[in-house]
Image: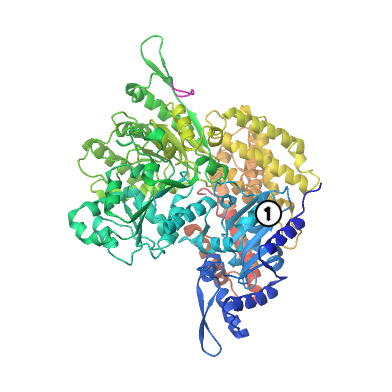
Amino acid sequence: MPLQSEYALETSLIKQLNGMEYASVVIEDETAMLANLKRQLELHNNGIKLSSNEFERVLNHLNTGGIFERAKLLRDRYELKRDNNETVYIRFLNSDDWCLNEFQVTNQVNMQGNRKNRYDVTLLINGLPLVQIELKRRGAELKVAFNQINRYQHDSYDAGFGLFQYVQLFIISNGVNTKYFSNNKHQSFKQTFFWTDKENKRLSDLHEFSAEFLKPCHIAKMITHYMVLTEEKVIKVLRPYQFYATEALVDRVKSSSENAYIWHTTGSGKTLTSFKASQIIMRNPKVHKVMFVVDRKDLDYQTAREFNGFSKGSVDETTDTRTLVKQLTDDSTKLILTTIQKLNNAIMHPQHLAKLGDLQDKKFVFIFDECHRSQFGDTHQNIKKFFRNAQMFGFTGTPIFADNATGSLGHQKTTKDLFGDCLHKYVIVDAIKDENVLRFAVEYVGKYTRKASANELDIATDTDIEVAGLDTKELLDSYPRLEKITDYILTHHAHKTKQPDFTAMFCVSSVETLIKYYELFKQKQVGLVKPLKVATIFSYAANEEDPNANGLVNGLIPEENPMPEGKINTYSRDKLDGFIADYNAMFGCNYSTSDSLSFYKYYQDIAKRVRQGQVDILLVVNMFLTGFDSPRLNTLYVDKNLKYHGLVQAFSRTNRILNDKKSQGNIVCFRNLKAATDEAIALFSNKDAKETVLLEPYEDYVKQFNDATLELLKIAPTVKSVDALPDENAELAFATAFRELMRIKNVLTSFADFDEADLALEPQKFEDYKSKYLDLHDKVKKQTEGEKASVLEDIDFELTLIHRDEINVAYILNLLVSLNKLPPEEAKKRQKEIIDLVAGEIQLRSKRQLIEEFIEDNLPKLKPNEDVIGAFESYWNNHKQAAFQKLCEDENIVPEKFARVLQTYEFQNRLPRDGEIVEALSFKPKILERKTILERVADKIQNFITTFVEGMGGV
């Protein structure tokens, strides 16, 4: 039986939508869409009749700004001054009664932009295209449809009046798999989501998906209630588990006064869920205030930053207890974010009670973040006792159960005991299955045996697992062990973090041990040209150490306050001041522990730099092991006993989704935490979850790579045979097969055991095939307007997997300097290797021809001790100046203004905007020609920058 075609899939979907009360409408082009929009807006706005001039004013209003600005216009009303000078307000979307909108479906709309495109299925709400569905035949790769939407965004969504920039949601499907995502030009495939039912069962079949997700009321509710327009000008849509959790919380507030909790695994986006729940609940007229409560000053700052990122000014972070009391008594403040410590001070201190007495019987909704750690002391009872009409909800990624409750902070209560029902559950297995978080690759390093000659311990860090029974404080804190671990990290850090792409955190058992490690890192990197940037932060309060050196109490990571109070440990403080001085020198700062505010600013700065990837290794005891979110962090070194909550929370610092190159979170344990890891995974998911949560052993990936090599060689037995592939379908098969090799190798190279000799494809052949792979990518990139679309456009080449910042022009020049001093035969051999390296590096390919010409024509003319770098710089600058002049002449660009454009790029790292290009031209382009000219000139400027500015490495 033949596979269902794309046409058949489209016809079936439209028939299904008609049965769901979508009215079919024939819209062939923009003219028809505008006529339909006029009719639908008139219908939606109580039958108002718009004259041609009035509708033109509406269109001019709608044709303003880009995707983000239009998303805001969609949700606002337009004040229309009518021809008779009356004023009416035109509504484009009914957000209050979301079912009361006008729903239509059309297909195969033609739009002419850079190219003429036809869109598969479009859902219109009140005449505006708000949902776009792109289909591929059954069996096709889903990413094909995603890539097609990206192409449309570039080619034609902004054509004409740009109505397709009003699309809020995209849906892609091949019939078997269906995903949705918000409209954002810079989205990656990792920001596409499956829809599920409440039990997280995936509804991936197009018919199933449409029956639930595309119900008119549901799709309108998603657009009006479950999308967030952030301060970063990004449109976000909630994932299904976030939707169900929010709905459950809102319903619980409406229908009862009972408490409850949400169990969503660490890294799944609890802040966005809690923000959306808070935002909706605070609109309930029965609710006096919503209190979002965190348990530490650092999370208070981080959560406030994230909340205000979702909606500017949504919360006013309470800086002290007096501010909190003022907000509590201000009826205009509906949402408050504070710490549990400040809240407890407010309701327990006599000087505040007189002001707060009137609030005791008012309806308060409390949402507690990370409630597994904040709600098991007297404070929780104090809050319940004071706020007599309070409803309490908890969010946690690691709940307290009977198995791990005993002795927890002196109590034996579970999360259920304190909060009641779990309204929605989304565990780590669900998140990994949905590709919302990554799996973990856990390696155990360290073996301790007694020497035959003496009763001493021989420490080696190149074997697998620590021997039981020798886990003593004397051994664990011994200098030889710490030194060997430091050496191990310095040896393996670059490939663990794919330096400089990612960063690492190193958690240790105590401040005393941390100080030793920091000094070892510093000592062992003296004199290195590019030492690792190691930074640290810890509390310098007295009695900061765990007497058992465990770093945890029954699975809970003890709190380290970034605002130390009370008695100070002078030794720790002096040491930390020295480490902060190193940090100041490294980054040009001026922090210290001289006062708590300066130290807190240091805390904030170090958090920012870790997120930005400026710190290679962050050394900590407990700080940053919970609640801290940095997608660029991919490795956790562990020399600390962890279990239950503490283990999952710490490991989860590494598994945030970022890009294709970040394939897993790396955990390197210098203690035997295998049993603790297995127990924690079983507790917070299920006993069979290990295979889902943890990566397979190294040997399994070697086998996968070698099997994939055999498949590649069936398509292209030799590197030369790639050039002889019969058609684009064969080229697509080769590209897909080589991409699979890249994916597996990306995982393999993160293992400490990685050895090229284990692989069936030797390194040079891999590089040669990679060069051919990039040739195919270039073929697609160079395709010009009017050419038939290539099937190669339907593959994501995932170039991030092979991009290496360190391979730049400066790197190549250093190779050429050494090449010029070699004997002729050896030089000739190395010359080919360098040319092959240039061909296989993404950011050098635009420079490939020039570099190869220099190597072949100029380099042989230089004497052995002649200045290679100087000769290259002269050669390069001549070509750069010639290209500069040619571009200016060909496109009538004023040279001085083009120079300013390039200067802006170098300082601000952004390509020129349309207005800047117009300003640089020596003439004013006609309106009808402007778009074509600007796109052509922008492409040429980008090519110039790619060739002569980017990837030079300081040359």
Left or right of residue 174, residue 590 in this image: left
Please state which amino acid type lies under the numbered disc 1.
Answer: His
Residue 320 part of the magenta-drawn span: no
Q: Residue at x 23, y 58 (%)?
A: 322
- In the orientation shown, which residue stands out farthest toward the bottom? 84
Residue 831 visible in the displayed image:
no
Q: Position of residue 930 (x, y in %)?
A: 63, 73
Front-most of 296 and 926? 296
Choose top left, top right, bottom left or bottom right for residue 545.
Answer: top left
Choose top left, top right, bottom left or bottom right for residue 703.
Answer: top right
Front-most of 105 and 673? 105
- Disc 1 target residue: 207
- In the orientation shown, which residue stands out farthest toward the top? 453
Magenta part of the chain: 461-466
Under circle 1, the secondary element is: helix
| Residue 261 higher or lower than 746, as above or below | below
Left or right of residue 589, residue 252 in this image: right
Q: Position of residue 278 (x, y in %)?
A: 41, 58
For the stretch drawn in magenta, the main secondary structure is: loop
